Image (cartoon, rainbow, N blue to C red):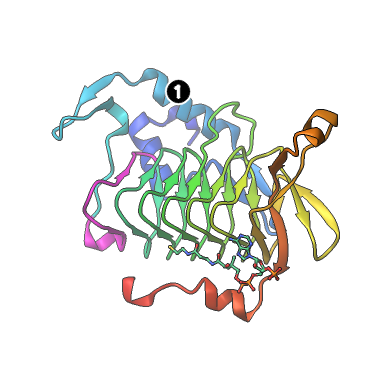
Amino acid sequence: MQLDELTNDRFLRQLEDGSLRVASPDDQGNWHVHQDVKQRILTVFKTSGLTSFANGSVDKAALAPRHFNTADGVRLIPGGSAIRAGACVQTGVVVCPPAWINTGAYVDVDTMIDSHALVGSCAQVGKRVHLSAGAQLGGVLEPIGNRPVIIEDDVFIGTQAAVVEGVIIRRNAVIAPGVLLSASVTIYDTVNHTTHTGEVPQNAVVVPGSRPARGEYAQQNNLQLNCPVIVKYRDHNTDAATQLEQALR
Ligand SMILES: CC(C)(COP(=O)(O)OP(=O)(O)OC[C@H]1O[C@@H](n2cnc3c(N)ncnc32)[C@H](O)[C@@H]1OP(=O)(O)O)[C@@H](O)C(=O)NCCC(=O)NCCS
């Protein structure tokens, strides 16, 4: 069935069950953005009027917060989280309060979304990811051609880290607490003596750093800029440092 033949309701349910996605990987691990799906999400926003919900909140009528039951296999811990209509949350996911998962987001199996974490609209989060307390994944709904934030399988995002503007974090990478990754930030790789922009390679361990700002004025004033640094590639120590507390799951 064509997207425009689906009612808003049917479209949102298909986003929620994962049969429609804003972006998906091919067999080679290349991600493809489905602009028609993003466009349709925008149409839902534009065509849906406001309504008030039983708990006193007001939002687009089509985008009522999702409800779960034990058969879904999702643990939505009570205490103020919201998962908006049109967000896919797969089985085994744990959501600690308060957290916000917006429309078009996709959260794959066994991922942990810790307290105060944000999964912005259309962000794609892989399997067994750990999104630590206060971690922020930006949303990218417009322009529709732009890639959303993508976090691949088994990635660890440390507390208070932020990934925005369509940055992609490849499998098994580790983002240390407080790292800020946006599209124009240069990531320095001290292992391979190279730089990356918009993408963190597989298994990379990225920590926050700073570098001297360019230009005479910046040098005179000793200014530094945010500079994520790859200090190593994942090893046994990293696995130990990022292990999930099984008791919490
Ligand atoms: C990033 C991390 C996984 C690295 O662990 P590791 O692989 O054992 O690596 P190490 O601790 O040996 O650190 C490697 C290097 O990075 C540096 N480094 C590690 N974390 C850093 C940080 N947050 N900021 C700056 N530098 C950091 C270390 O000082 C070390 O540098 P050196 O080799 O010059 O001494 C770990 O430091 C970490 O942040 N764990 C997650 C904590 C967290 O977010 N918990 C939240 C749970 S809710």
Q: Residue at x 46, y 44 (%)?
A: 105
Instruction: Give the side of residue 16 with respect to residue 4, left or right.
Output: left
Q: In the image, is residue 49 above or below residue 80?
A: above
Q: What element carries label 1?
A: helix
Instruction: Give the side of residue 231 with respect to residue 4, left or right.
Output: right
Instruction: Give the side of residue 68 with respect to residue 5, left or right.
Output: left
The one of 148 and 238 positioned closer to us in this rendering: 238
Q: Residue at x 18, y 30 (%)?
A: 53
Can residue 30 be seen in this snapshot? Answer: no
The C terminus appears in which quarter of the rendering?
Answer: bottom left
Q: Disc 1 designates what residue?
A: 43
The one of 193 and 118 positioned closer to us in this rendering: 193
Estimate the x, y position of residue 90 in percent, counting from the top left: 40, 57
Can residue 194 be seen in this snapshot? Answer: yes
Q: Specify the principal SS of the magenta part.
A: loop
Outermost residue toward the left in this view: 54
Specify the quadrant of the image occupied by residue 11: top left
Task: Magenta stretch: give its range.
Answer: 69-86
User: Mark 1: which amino acid?
Assistant: Thr
Q: Which residue is drawn at 80% across and 66% down?
A: 191
The one of 135 and 54 positioned closer to us in this rendering: 135
